[in-house]
């Protein structure tokens, strides 16, 4: 017996590349975005030698919060952020967030004039779980889990995929 069908955006997404206008696709981070129907965890760790890459969404950080699609926009309501920029809402035109027609395991986030990211689905099957409290967001999609939490105002996060993990430690 299988569970309910997932929404097209639910998954454990690992970024394959980011490109800005006039640039070439590159990946300066190990970046994971774990998205459930109503919440997300995002953890990015800059690769050695790429710390000052100048690219958007490409620094070491952990952030998490609630998610919705409304009024033609995808909205990530960021409640916890290791860079301290909360609360805020990151927005994308719903038409700029889509699954590739050529590859159903590839999500594209296209912000014309700013950047284009390609994300690979790493957990196309499996259960989806969410735990949320005032200082923690934890999600699991298939065998990929992520948590972002705040302790005494310092935010940290970690993503686990099998025996591997990446993390952003609190200050």
Image (cartoon, rainbow, N blue to C red):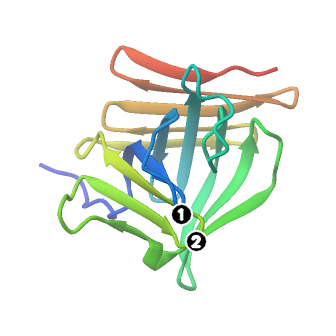
Query: Quadrant of residue 104 in the image?
Result: bottom left
- Along the line of sight, which residue is nearer the eye, 106 or 23? 23
Please tell me which residue is depicted at 25% across the width and 61% down the height of the picture: 5
Q: Quadrant of the C terminus?
A: top right
Left or right: 151 in relation to 138: right
Left or right: 150 in relation to 11: right
Q: Position of residue 59 (x, y in %)?
A: 65, 37
* Residue that numbered label 1 is attached to: 21
Residue sticking out furthest to the bottom: 71
Q: Position of residue 118 (x, y in %)?
A: 39, 53
- Decide which of tag 1 and tag 2 comes sooner along the chain: 1
Q: Position of residue 15 (x, y in %)?
A: 42, 43
Categorize mark 1 by other alpha carbons within 10 Å: few (<14), some (14-19), many (20+). few
Q: Secondary structure at mark 2?
A: loop
- Along the line of sight, which residue is nearer the eye, 45 or 130? 45
Query: Quadrant of residue 150 in the image?
Result: top right
* Residue that numbered label 2 is attached to: 113
Cα separation, mark 1 vs mark 2, equals: 6 Å
Categorize mark 2 by other alpha carbons within 10 Å: few (<14), some (14-19), many (20+). few
The disc at residue 154 is: none
Q: Position of residue 165 (x, y in %)?
A: 46, 19
Circles 1 and 2: CB distance less than 8 Å? yes
Please tell me which residue is depicted at 32% across the width and 46% down the height of the picture: 120
Please tell me which residue is depicted at 44% across the width and 51% down the height of the picture: 24
- In the rendered view, tell whether residue 48 sits above or below residue 132: above
Residue sticking out furthest to the right: 152
């Amino acid at each position: 017996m299988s569970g309910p069908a997932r929404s097209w955006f639910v998954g454990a997404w690992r970024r394959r590349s980011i490109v800005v206008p006039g640039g070439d696709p590159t990946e300066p981070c190990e970046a994971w975005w774990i998205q459930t129907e109503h919440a997300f965890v995002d953890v990015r760790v800059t690769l050695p030698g790429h710390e000052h890459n100048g690219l958007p969404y490409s620094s070491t950080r952990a952030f998490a919060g609630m998610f919705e699609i409304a009024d033609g926009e995808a909205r990530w309501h960021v409640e916890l952020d290791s860079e301290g920029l909360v609360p805020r809402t990151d927005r994308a035109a719903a038409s700029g967030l889509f699954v590739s027609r050529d590859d159903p395991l590839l999500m594209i986030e296209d912000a014309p004039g700013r950047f284009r990211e390609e994300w690979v689905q790493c957990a196309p099957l499996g259960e989806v779980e969410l735990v949320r409290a005032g200082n923690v967001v934890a999600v699991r999609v298939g065998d990929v889990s992520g948590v972002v939490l705040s302790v005494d105002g310092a935010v940290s996060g970690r993503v686990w995929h099998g025996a591997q993990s990446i993390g952003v430690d609190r200050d």
